[in-house]
């Protein structure tokens, strides 16, 4: 849900994505944005569900059917849900066909969920192969990519002082994460509090607030004059779930 706060700040700054990608729970938020939902709509959608129920694939697909368009072709903005194809653990972008099963595949967490079988592929959580799908956003056509990173591993490493620029970073961050950073022009990294994972409205508010704070700080750093407006360079956005990855 921290992605909702990031989207709120970008919207208020007049920044509109032309392309979207999402991994794990980020695929739910990405699909919502691609469907034309506002940050307020996304917040209400989040409030309307006890999120642990979405760990079940059937519940997740029914949730998507209630709140999101049926097919990718019904979306307003080009969007890719990222999943991991087994057994070679290759990241793939799903951009056509039914939306609910694509999101379910992107969110099929290791151990907790079984794989999703779709179009001849055996698919699991996109975060296994691509925690931050910035490169896929670039492949869609984005010239400027904004990454919203709530991956638990990067949060933990940053918390102990090992950010991606640290001399020992390559020992701890996977190669796929470093590749994604090369395609990210502006990285937003919400510090998600543990209390934010607790189901309920208070947890949602904490998540959204964390996204708002991180996005404001990132934009202020990128444009220190504070001159962020609709006339600014038009970034394209991608959302990662840690589940998103972003798993929120």
Image (tube, rainbow, N blue to C red):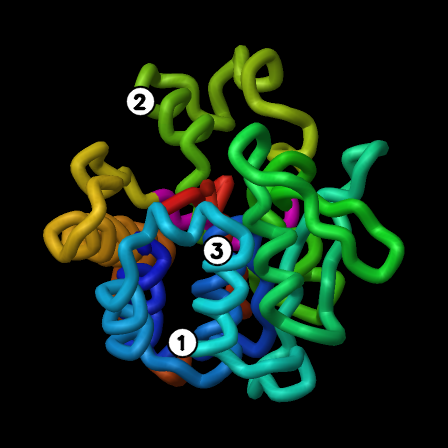
Asked whether 175 or 61 is in front, the reply is 61
Mark drawn on residue 207: none
- Few, some or many C-alpha atoms within 10 Å of disc 2 (few <14, some 14-19, many ≥20)? few
Q: Residue furthest front?
A: 58
Residue shown at the point (53%, 49%) measured from the top left? 24
Asked whether 190 or 37 is in front, the reply is 37
- Few, some or many C-alpha atoms within 10 Å of disc 3 (few <14, some 14-19, many ≥20)? many
Asked whether 55 or 1 is in front, the reply is 55
Q: CA distance from mark 2 to mark 1?
A: 29 Å
Asked where in the image residue 159 lies, by quadrant, the reply is top left
Say if the magenta span includes residue 99.
no
Residue shown at the point (41%, 32%) measured from the top left? 152
Asked whether 51 or 149 is in front, the reply is 51
What secondary structure is found at the residue carrying circle 2? helix
Q: Are marks 3 and 1 in contact (CB under 8 Å)?
A: no
Q: Is residue 143 above or below residue 155?
A: below
Range of residues picked out in magenta: 182-189
Q: Is residue 29 left or right of residue 195?
A: right
Q: CA distance from mark 3 to mark 1?
A: 19 Å
Q: CA distance from mark 2 to mark 3?
A: 22 Å
Mark drawn on residue 15: 1
Sequence order check, earlier mark of 2 and 1: 1
Q: Residue under label 2, please give it.
A: 159
Q: Is residue 241 above or below residue 223?
A: above
What secondary structure is found at the residue carrying circle 3? helix
Q: Residue under label 3, please give it.
A: 26
Q: Are marks 2 and 3 in contact (CB under 8 Å)?
A: no
Query: Is residue 235 in view from this perspective?
Result: no
Residue shown at the point (84%, 61%) measured from the top left? 119
Q: Is residue 47 left or right of residue 159?
A: left
Sequence order check, earlier mark of 3 and 1: 1
Q: Are marks 2 and 1 in contact (CB under 8 Å)?
A: no
């Amino acid at each position: 849900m921290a992605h909702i706060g990031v989207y709120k700040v970008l919207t208020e700054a007049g920044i509109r994505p032309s392309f979207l990608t999402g991994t794990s729970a980020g695929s739910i938020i990405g699909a919502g944005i691609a469907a034309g939902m506002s940050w307020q709509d996304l917040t209400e959608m989040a409030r309307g569900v006890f999120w642990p129920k979405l760990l079940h694939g059937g519940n997740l697909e029914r949730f998507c059917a209630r709140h999101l368009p049926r097919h990718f072709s019904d979306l307003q903005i080009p969007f890719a849900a990222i999943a991991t194809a087994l057994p070679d653990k290759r990241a793939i972008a799903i951009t056509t066909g039914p939306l609910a099963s694509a999101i379910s595949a992107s969110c099929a967490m290791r151990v907790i969920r079984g794989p999703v079988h779709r179009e001849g592929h055996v698919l699991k959580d996109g975060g296994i192969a691509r925690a931050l799908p910035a490169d896929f956003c670039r492949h869609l056509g984005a010239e400027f990519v904004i990454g919203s990173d709530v991956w638990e591993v990067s949060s933990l490493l940053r918390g102990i002082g090992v950010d991606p620029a640290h001399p020992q970073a390559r020992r701890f961050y996977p190669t796929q994460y470093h590749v994604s950073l090369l395609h990210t022009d502006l990285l937003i990294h919400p510090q998600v509090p543990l209390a934010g994972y607790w189901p309920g409205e208070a947890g949602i508010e904490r998540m959204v607030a964390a996204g708002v704070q991180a996005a404001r700080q990132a934009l202020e750093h990128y444009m220190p004059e504070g001159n962020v407006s609709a006339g600014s360079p038009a970034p394209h956005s991608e959302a990662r779930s840690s589940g998103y990855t972003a798993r929120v």
